[in-house]
Image: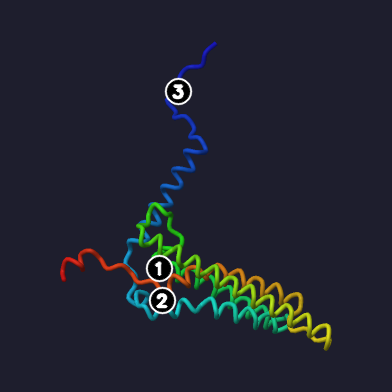
């Protein structure tokens, strides 16, 4: 017995689905990159102020860690979360998602700028880890010598969370600090 042929399309393979999803994602990223930046976000000064958001996020995390738990730690943790999430979104928006765009959507100059920002972001992440190490050593020394802990167990969780947010922002922040938006070709022709 044979089954009658059907007009239904064959199910797509997982590779075809992934390729389709990747193409859709690249189209969305490309569309977002083409949209003009708001005037307030297009200035170099604004990008540099946004590039300092990781410092503020980490500082709030340290304050939450040292607060010793309770409502103040929860409040500072919430502000840290809000600032970190806003920072990631605005930094990526200010640099036209250059740190997150697929390589196929970028030209050689943009790839070079992105790679340079990732190198700076890596160095800044090492500085962040060094600061955490120094704080851990100081905390251990004070706990051993004076029975006073700067950071308790809840504080370390808040500090670790703030550190992850900060490390996630560092490449985009390094890019925002130095990035200059390319001049449109239309502007070049007018000169």
Residue 186, picture quadrant? bottom left
Measured along the vertical axis of the image, is residue 6 above or below residue 135?
Answer: above
Which of the two residues, 109 or 96, is positioned nearer the viewer here? Answer: 109
Residue 41 coordinates in the image, percent (x, y)? 37, 75
Residue beneath disc 3: 6
Of callouts 2 and 3, which one flags the residue occurring earlier in the amino acid sequence? Answer: 3
Instruction: Say left or right for 189 vs 22.
Output: left
Q: Which mark is residue 95?
A: 1
Dot 3 crowding, Cα within 10 Å, few <14, some 14–19, many 20+: few
Q: Mark 2 and mark 1 in contact? Answer it, CB < 8 Å.
A: yes
Q: Which mark is residue 47?
A: 2
Q: CA distance from mark 2 to mark 3?
A: 57 Å
Measured along the vertical axis of the image, is residue 116 above or below residue 50?
Answer: above
Q: CA distance from mark 3 to mark 1?
A: 50 Å
* Residue displayed at 41% across by 49% down: 24
Report helix, strand or loop for mark 1.
Answer: loop
Which of the two residues, 2 or 136, is positioned nearer the viewer here? Answer: 136
Residue 37 coordinates in the image, percent (x, y)? 34, 70
């Amino acid at each position: 017995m044979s089954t009658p042929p059907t007009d239904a399309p064959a199910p797509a393979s997982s590779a075809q689905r992934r390729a389709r999803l990747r193409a859709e994602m690249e189209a969305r990223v490309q569309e977002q990159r083409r949209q003009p930046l708001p005037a307030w976000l297009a200035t170099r000064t604004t990008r540099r102020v946004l590039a300092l958001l990781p410092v503020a996020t980490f500082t709030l995390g340290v304050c939450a860690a040292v607060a010793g738990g309770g409502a103040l730690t929860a409040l500072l943790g919430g502000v840290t979360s809000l600032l970190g999430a806003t920072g990631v979104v605005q930094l990526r928006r200010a640099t036209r998602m250059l740190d997150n765009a697929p390589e196929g959507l970028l030209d050689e100059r943009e790839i070079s700028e992105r790679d340079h920002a990732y190198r700076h972001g890596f160095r800044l992440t090492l500085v962040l880890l060094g600061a955490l190490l120094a704080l851990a050593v100081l905390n251990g020394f004070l706990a051993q010598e004076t029975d006073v802990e700067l950071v308790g167990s809840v504080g370390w969780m808040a500090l670790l969370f703030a550190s992850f947010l900060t490390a996630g922002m560092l490449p985009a922040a390094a890019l925002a600090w130095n990035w200059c938006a390319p001049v449109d070709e239309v502007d070049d022709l007018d000169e």
